[in-house]
Image (cartoon, coloured by chain):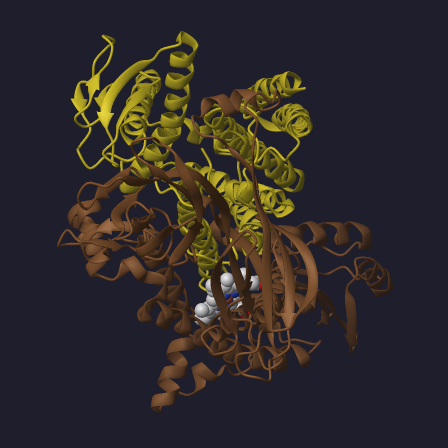
Amino acid sequence: MAELSSNLLYIAFIIYLIATAVFAMSLSDKKGNEKAAYTRKWGRIGYGLSILGFISQLGYFVTRWIASGHAPVSNLFEFTTFFGMMMVFAFILLYGIYRTNALGVFAMPIALLVIAYGSMFPRDIAPLIPALQSDWLKIHVTTAALGEGILSISFVAGFIYLIRMVDQTVSSKKTKMIEIIMYLLLCVLGFVLVSAISSAAGYETKFDWTDKKDQKTELTYNVPALVGPPNGTQADNHFGPLLNAPSWMNGEEAPKKFNTFIWSLLTGGVLYGIIRLILRKRIAAAIQPKLKNLKPDLVDEISYRSVAIGFPVFTLGALIFAMIWAQQAWTRFWGWDPKEVWALITFLFYAAYLHFRLSRGWHGEKSAWLCVIGFVIIMFNLVAVNLVISGLHSYA
Amino acid sequence: MRYEGSAVRSQTYNKTFIDKIWNFFSSVKVGIGIIIVILVAAAIGTIFPQEMYIPPNVDPTTYYKQEYGTPGQIFYLLGFHNLYGSWWFLLLLAALGISLIIVSIDRGVPLYRALKHQRVTRHESFMKRQRLFAVSDHGISFEQVKKVLLGKRYKIKEDNGNILAEKNRFSRWGPYVNHTGLIIFLIGAMLRFFPGMYTDQTLWIREGETAAIPGTKTDEGQYYAKNHKFVMELYNKKDKQFSNALNQVNNEVPKNYQSNVTLYHADPSHVVGEAPQLKKVKDAKIKVNEPLAFGDYALYQVDFKLNEFHRMNLKLEKKSTGKSFGEIKINLFNPKSEYNLGNGYKVKMIEYFPNFKLDEDGQPATENSVPDNPAFVFKMFTPETPKGETAFIGIRKNVEAGKNKYKMTFSGLETKNVSALTVKKDRTLPIIIVGGIIFMLGVVQGLYWNHRRIWIQQKNGQLWIAAHTNKNWFGLKKEMQAISQESGLVMPVDQSDEKSA
Ligand code: HEM
């Protein structure tokens, strides 16, 4: 069962990849009537593939649930891939309403990146510790992930709006920001590539070092060490660290995470550089002509609509259900633990977005930038809060 | 448009001090400002752990600097280590509440008036101002239009051959409903600070022990709990399903923490000093995630201590022969001062240190009364040594005053598990739940439905059509397209498209 499960995830991944390519193809340069038919046809195929991939991933989810005996949303791998699945689901929902192919061109690869990122964490089926043994856990986590998935589509649509609308003839702060987002997305790809290649090669290098609690421990890097732990010594003669992490970076596995982080930034940089060399212009500038038939109003509306749909779902899952569970598990519905606080921040941010938009008339570009920030907050909660600011939520 | 010409208080008065405050808090700009300040402050508060999450026995004045250097010190000095309980954070939440109340009154009342008295026949300029608008020379059948509109669940009002079709007006109340929910929620959260609303205490209770549950004493009596057993189960590393994951970690992975208890209730005793009459309420297994609820209270499994020393056995032996003259059993929570072994053999306990340590002067002392590291000063009496021999005995410690003929040796240890149960009473919960439900209903009401209106008017032999929605113009346009197809009405033009094109 566990094997079937991981195969289904793998198949879903491949189908999503094909769907992305099909959606990209559907943005053709053809003219007139022919174009409309062409776009419709390939859009439909892409949409069908997305649904097929989603069903396959749903199969992964169900079989893994059966194999482990609990909803597979209890560690970083499970949660992150589920979040990716919810992004796909949200995309399916919104494409169903608005039929915009460009949405698929961006939503699918971003969901793919999320799933690939999640797959780099330990994938073994683990049992639940007592605090996680509650029906409210699965209700809370799945609803919260669904809410975040729908909210992410508002970023996708907002990002498309920005690529479509920001003047690319001159370099400006805005074009730079858009390129930075492109670069960061490529860094995630970089992280996936480096982790996957190293793990396929079975790479390992070990350090002896003294950690925060003044304990001598061994730290195993799974990617080559660019940055070693502060005052540690490498225990083998693999490629050695070029420099050591600063001394305050002594938390559990902190230097290792930092090293992987540096690798991601570097690989992202290399990928970005290669793409720029090929395109000979900013990435967004290369994409922009493909979007010229897209009505900016429509993407703006999609972006807003995703928030309108996602905000209540997120509130229900990430705050209300979370509070009910916390009241049962930890005796209090709210304890200001970092994960809770970041859910609240996400909530407040989108509340601010709605007020900017509905009361102060922030449409179009301003609204799109807000959606970008919202996604950064969601990602921060997923990545940084789990890996850096660890709280009671014992993921990873 | 939003309040349809009804006067909004904040835009009418701006004279007195109260007007100024009113206007300040009713401004959406200010409201968003408050939200963002709370958001940013909350985010900064997560950079380093809050005071309640740092180890309990460290001094926060030095901890933050030591652990996190200068940034940590700044964090501490600015009060972010206890952000969420600080007066200024609470003040921000209060400002949010006030703003919500004022904005709801300021806009809610005029909106109510405006929606209550909608005119069907509108002025030309009103029609022209609408984003979706068209004028057509074709006459059409009003009956057909009405049928189509009714089919789309519009409510229709007619006046002088003009039509106002409206639907989902209730969604306009979404913001007011959700804000009301938030206000109730905030009030609920503040009520916690009133006496009698909230109890949060922890009870450490040993196996076999019966204890009064703190914070449950009322005029009707008090609850007691007896801890029969604390159970800890671990996952089996050989368990096939999970073995891969379990073998990745060095530690054991816990499966269950559980206290088997009996809950008792006792009526208030009338005689001072009389033992309470316990009446059994129920047996329960309290697990993490499965608290025991009774009355206003809930009892949670929160912590435990395994194998706490409970009883220690020692034998009196003669050193030269190793012969034993009997065993004493010391209840570490309630030791006797003298243990008589018969035949003239006895042991007196001169001093007892349940949790032994050496104090600053190097003198024996005890950390607290929990027997984690028991130590004793005994005086041993035998027929051979009637004056008694003194010895200091602790775990792996044995100090004698002079040269003794007899000694005490460990012969057994009995341990017990201890459960930590937290008892909670939170009378604010119902208010908070009601607030939460109202909030959810309000957001769904406001965001999943839209207030749509269509005006169809006959002016100078022409047909004027205008349509408005408070949000989701795409949806309205799609609906107008369907309506015009089915009824022959001309499709209004989106005037904002024309402007941007
Ligand atoms: C965390 C706090 C808040 C939340 C979660 C919140 C939530 C919302 C939501 C979801 C909407 C849109 C609802 C809809 O259109 O159906 C809304 C609208 C609105 N909110 Fe808030 N709100 C908050 C605080 C405030 C504050 C402090 C103010 C004070 C100025 C305010 C003023 C408004 C106004 C004026 C509207 C628009 C009403 C209209 O369209 O007529 N909100 N709020």
The correct choice, above or below, for A261 with respect to B284 in the image is above
The correct choice, above or below, for A184 with respect to A165 in the image is above
**Hue used for the chain lettered B:** brown
Image location of residue B45, percent across then percent down: 32, 55
Residue placed at 25% from the left, 9% from the top?
Answer: A238
Q: How many marks?
A: 0
**Can residue A162 be seen here?**
no
Q: Nearer the viewer, residue B21 or B220?
A: B220
Identify the image quadrant of residue B298: bottom right
For the N terminus of chain B, the quadrant is bottom right
**Hue used for the chain lettered A:** yellow
Image location of residue B193, percent across then percent down: 45, 75
The correct choice, above or below, for B54 with respect to A32 in the image is below
Identify the image quadrant of residue B114: bottom right
Query: Which residue is at the far left?
Result: B361
Residue placed at 81% from the left, 61% from the top?
Answer: B145
**Can residue A373 be seen here?**
yes
Q: Nearer the viewer, residue B123 or B250?
A: B250
The correct choice, above or below, for A46 with respect to B442 in the image is above
Query: Which residue is at the far bottom?
Result: B16
Image location of residue A222, percent across then percent down: 35, 17
Q: Nearer the viewer, residue B369 or B114?
A: B369
Image location of residue A224, percent across then percent down: 29, 15
Q: Nearer the viewer, residue A31 or B192?
A: B192
Q: Is residue B397 left or right of residue B247?
A: left
Q: Is residue A66 left or right of residue B251?
A: right
